[in-house]
């Protein structure tokens, strides 16, 4: 499940910059946004999100919470910039990336809500001993000296 779309990313970055960070395959550059490059960044970001929240929530989620959409946009934009090594990643962008990861950690640890009830935890009760209906081989009386 992808947590954001190309249109979500367009709402956070200018079209010219999006072309610059996606249409870099020289000499085949077209001067337009390469949707396949953006989709790859979104897929990678969504996989990261699933890795964090999957231990707390049953996947796929029934819907896309807005907080996860925002996190996915931030991670995807960072991934797009990172793939173009000549471009410097700004401190602000690094901060947004680090904050997104911290939010995922808080969600996974149950310190932050995404508006969906987490999966019920499996009760850790130790172990159980099955009985076959016969008299036990060892008992308190037979073990006494």
Image: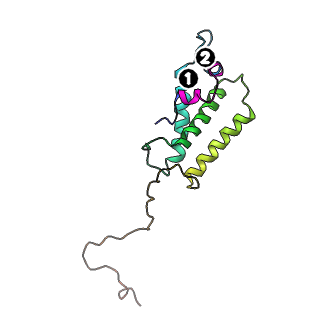
Identify the image quadrant of residue 63: top left
Image coords of residue 23 (percent x, y): 60, 17
Q: Which residue is drawn at 64% across and 21% down?
A: 21
Q: Count the marks.
A: 2
Q: Residue furthest left?
A: 133
Q: Residue furthest front?
A: 11
Is residue 93 one of those drawn in magenta?
no
Instruction: Report the front residue among 2 and 144.
Output: 2
Instruction: Report the front residue among 64 and 23.
Output: 64
Mark 1 lies on residue: 37
* CB-based contact (under 8 Å), mark 2 and mark 1: yes
Question: Which quarter of the rendered picture does the C terminus lie within?
Answer: bottom left
| Vertical order, 21 against 77 (above or below) | above
Is disc 1 surrounded by few (<14), some (14 to 19) or many (20+) residues within 10 Å? some
Image coords of residue 59 (percent x, y): 44, 45
Image coords of residue 70 (percent x, y): 58, 38
Mark 2 element type: loop
Image coords of residue 26 (percent x, y): 63, 11
Q: Earlier in the sequence, mark 2 or mark 1?
A: 2
Question: Which label belongs to residue 23?
Answer: 2
Part of the protein shown in magenta = 6-19
How far is disc 2 from disc 1 in space, using C-alphas?
A: 8 Å
Which of the colour schemes (rainbow, by chain, secondary structure, one colour) is used? rainbow
Q: Residue at x 54, y 31 (%)?
A: 42
């Amino acid at each position: 499940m992808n947590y954001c779309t190309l249109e979500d990313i367009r709402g956070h970055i200018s079209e010219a910059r999006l072309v610059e960070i996606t249409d870099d395959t020289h000499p085949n550059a077209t001067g337009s946004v390469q949707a396949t490059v953006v989709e790859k960044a979104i897929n990678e970001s969504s996989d990261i999100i699933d890795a964090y929240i999957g231990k707390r929530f049953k996947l796929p989620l029934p819907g896309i919470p807005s907080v996860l959409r925002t996190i996915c946009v931030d991670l995807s934009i960072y991934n797009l910039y990172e793939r173009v090594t000549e471009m410097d990643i700004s401190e602000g962008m690094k901060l947004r990336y680090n904050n997104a990861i911290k939010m995922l950690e808080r969600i996974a640890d149950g310190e932050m809500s995404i508006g969906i009830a987490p999966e019920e935890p499996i009760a850790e009760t130790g172990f159980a001993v099955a009985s076959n209906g016969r008299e036990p081989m060892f008992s308190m009386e037979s073990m006494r000296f």
